[in-house]
Structure formats: structure tokens, C-alpha cells
């Protein structure tokens, strides 16, 4: 297994179910298969409009599986209350617009710093480690750090959608620069959105990125080869790139945050669990 974690997003198993209003296919069954095949965690995005994942899916996964759930959620009172009740291990705060096809950009933390910081505090108090889903803009890092969220997830959607090689290389550099700056600021760095076995390599090769969350392409692949095989293919694609990662110079590398460097509810530093 590659030394980078794989979170599998099962939203689109639920999309097929909701298209007909049937009881199948069950995203929780798919999640269990994904874990058995080596996924490190499962992501479910409980959207406000409940277009795919339903409340029951989230509760059932937490009740049935021992593996961590990463609950993607909007920064709303309803979602915060639900998360504090269900207590997933992780939550990822995302922007949400009802008309969008998918999450079309990162959270604008600097526009709502107090709201995001308060959500992080509430979730932390419930024992949930929070990631903020953001665009790779170094200038927004100060606002992100001020929320004291321990994790950040970089939106890789633009990189994945780009077809022009030069533009793509520029976006990849933007992601790598942001990952480096975020890790130096003490954040654990994740990435996701639009990743496939074909485009994941250069992202997995960024040394500061320790977790990738992948859904749509994996579910699409599972239609042909099954959930287990689709999950097993992904670490292979990731680890090929991870082996070629430039190793950071131990003399200058920033060590990962330790429990001691993570304060509880007061003082500076991330809200680590
Ligand atoms: N990470 C976040 C925060 C997301 O919103 C999504 C999409 O739900 C993903 C990862 C997974 O993206 P995809 O389904 O394109 O792999």
C-alpha cells in the first residue's frame, strides 16, 4: 500500500439509487467493500438537497463500519448539528450551491472567517477533526490557519479539467506551492476532486499531500470491474508516483504536528484530535 491515504467517496453509488428511488445500490455496502479492498476512509457528502447521500446512509455507515467516515458538509447550522450528533471521525467543510453539478470551487474562508472558525470549534468539541476544502491560493492561508482547522483539502478540479499541458503544469505548480506553504503552516494536507487513475500521479507525487479523496472516477470504474478492484487499482496508480517523490531534506523539513503541538480549545495552533 502506498504511504498516502486513500479516501473513497461513495456519493455516486447513491446517485444511481436516487435516480429511481429504489433501495439499491446501497452506498454503505459499497463503502464496506471499499474498506475491505484497502480504502483508509470513506467520504460521504450529505448535501442540503439530499440529491445522493441520505441521512440514513451516514448513520448506518457509522453504526456498521469500524473505519473512519469523512463527512463532507456545508457550513450550516443543520449540518453542524447533524455532524455533532453522528460524530464522524472527520468532517470536510465545503461550499455548496444548489444548482451546481458538483462542488465547483473551494470554501472562501476569508469572506466568512468567524463562521468557519465557529464551525471548526463546534465540530472539534464533538471530537471531529476538520478539513477545509479550498482552492490552492497561498494568499488565503492566513485566514485558513486562523480558523484552527487541522487539515486542509486542496480542490484539484481545475487541474483535472485542464487539457492544455502548459496550463495544467501551472495549476500543478500552484497546488504544489500551496501544499508546501500549508504544511509549513502546520496543516495536514489532503487533495481531491476529479482525480482518476490516469491523472492522480503528479498530485500523489507532491510530498506534503498525505491523503487523496476520490469518488466519481472510482465509482465509474467499479461499474466495469467492481468496487474492490477499482479501489485496489488506485493505490497502485498513486504509489507509482509516490516512489518517485522528491524526499524532503530532513534538515529543513517541517515535522508533522504531534499531539503536544495541538492545543485543545484555547490558544493558538490547530484543533487537533
Ligand atoms: N473532495 C471533496 C471535498 C469533494 O467535494 C469531492 C466531490 O464530492 C471529492 C473530494 C471527490 O471528487 P470526485 O468525485 O470528483 O472524485
Image (spheres, rainbow, N blue to C red):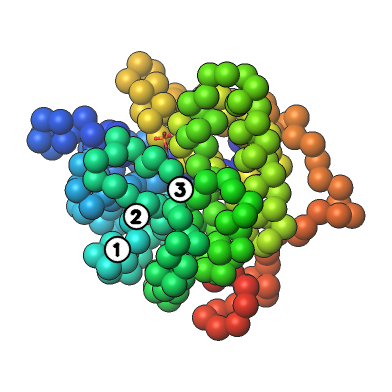
State how far apart marks 1 and 3 are (Cα).
16 Å
Residue 16 percent coordinates (x, y)? 21, 30
Discs 3/2, front: 3
Assess disc 1: are there few (<14), some (14-19) or many (≥20) residues with their C-alpha within 10 Å of its C-alpha. some
**Mark 1 touches mark 2? (CB < 8 Å):** yes
Residue 35 appears in the rendering: no
- Residue 186 falls in image quadrant: bottom right
Q: Relative to residue 130, is residue 179 depicted above or below?
A: above
* 186 or 215: nearer the viewer: 186
Residue found at x 23% / y 34%? 15
Under tag 3, what secondary structure? loop
Residue found at x 81% / y 41%? 247
Q: Which numbered disc, 3 or 2, marks the residue that appears first in the sequence?
A: 2
Please name the residue that numbered disc 1 is placed on.
76
For ligand 1, tell me if the residue under mark 1 lies within 8 Å.
no
Please name the residue that numbered disc 2 is placed on.
73
Residue most extreme to the right:
251
State how far apart marks 1 and 2 are (Cα).
8 Å
Please name the residue that numbered disc 3 is placed on.
106
Q: Which numbered disc, 1 or 3, marks the residue that appears first in the sequence?
A: 1
Residue 97 percent coordinates (x, y)? 29, 47
Amino acid at each position: 500500500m502506498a504511504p498516502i491515504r486513500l479516501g473513497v467517496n461513495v456519493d455516486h453509488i447513491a446517485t444511481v439509487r436516487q435516480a429511481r428511488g429504489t433501495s439499491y445500490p446501497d452506498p454503505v455496502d459499497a463503502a464496506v467493500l471499499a474498506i475491505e479492498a484497502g480504502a483508509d476512509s470513506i467520504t460521504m457528502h450529505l448535501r442540503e438537497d439530499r440529491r445522493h447521500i441520505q441521512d440514513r446512509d451516514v448513520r448506518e455507515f457509522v453504526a456498521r463500519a469500524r473505519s473512519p467516515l469523512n463527512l463532507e458538509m456545508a457550513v450550516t447550522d443543520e449540518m453542524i448539528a447533524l455532524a455533532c450528533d453522528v460524530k464522524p471521525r472527520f468532517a470536510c467543510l465545503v461550499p455548496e450551491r444548489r444548482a451546481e453539478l458538483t462542488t465547483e470551487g473551494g470554501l472562501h474562508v476569508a469572506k466568512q472567517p468567524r463562521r468557519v472558525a465557529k464551525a471548526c470549534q463546534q465540530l472539534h468539541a464533538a471530537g471531529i477533526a476538520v478539513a477545509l476544502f479550498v482552492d490552492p491560493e497561498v494568499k488565503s492561508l492566513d485566514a485558513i490557519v486562523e480558523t484552527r482547522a487541522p487539515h486542509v483539502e486542496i480542490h484539484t478540479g481545475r487541474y483535472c479539467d485542464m487539457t492544455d499541458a502548459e496550463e495544467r503544469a501551472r495549476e500543478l505548480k500552484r497546488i504544489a506551492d500551496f501544499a508546501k506553504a500549508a504544511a509549513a503552516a502546520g496543516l495536514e494536507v489532503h487533495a481531491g476532486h476529479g482525480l482518476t487513475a490516469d491523472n492522480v500521479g503528479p498530485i500523489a507525487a507532491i510530498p506534503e499531500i498525505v491523503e487523496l479523496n476520490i469518488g466519481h472516477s472510482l465509482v465509474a470504474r467499479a461499474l466495469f470491474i467492481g468496487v474492490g478492484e477499482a479501489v485496489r487499482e488506485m493505490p497502485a496508480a498513486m504509489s507509482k508516483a509516490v516512489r518517485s517523490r522528491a524526499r524532503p531534506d530532513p534538515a529543513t523539513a517541517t515535522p508533522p504536528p504531534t499531539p503536544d503541538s495541538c492545543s485543545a480549545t484555547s490558544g493558538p495552533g490547530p484543533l487537533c484530535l
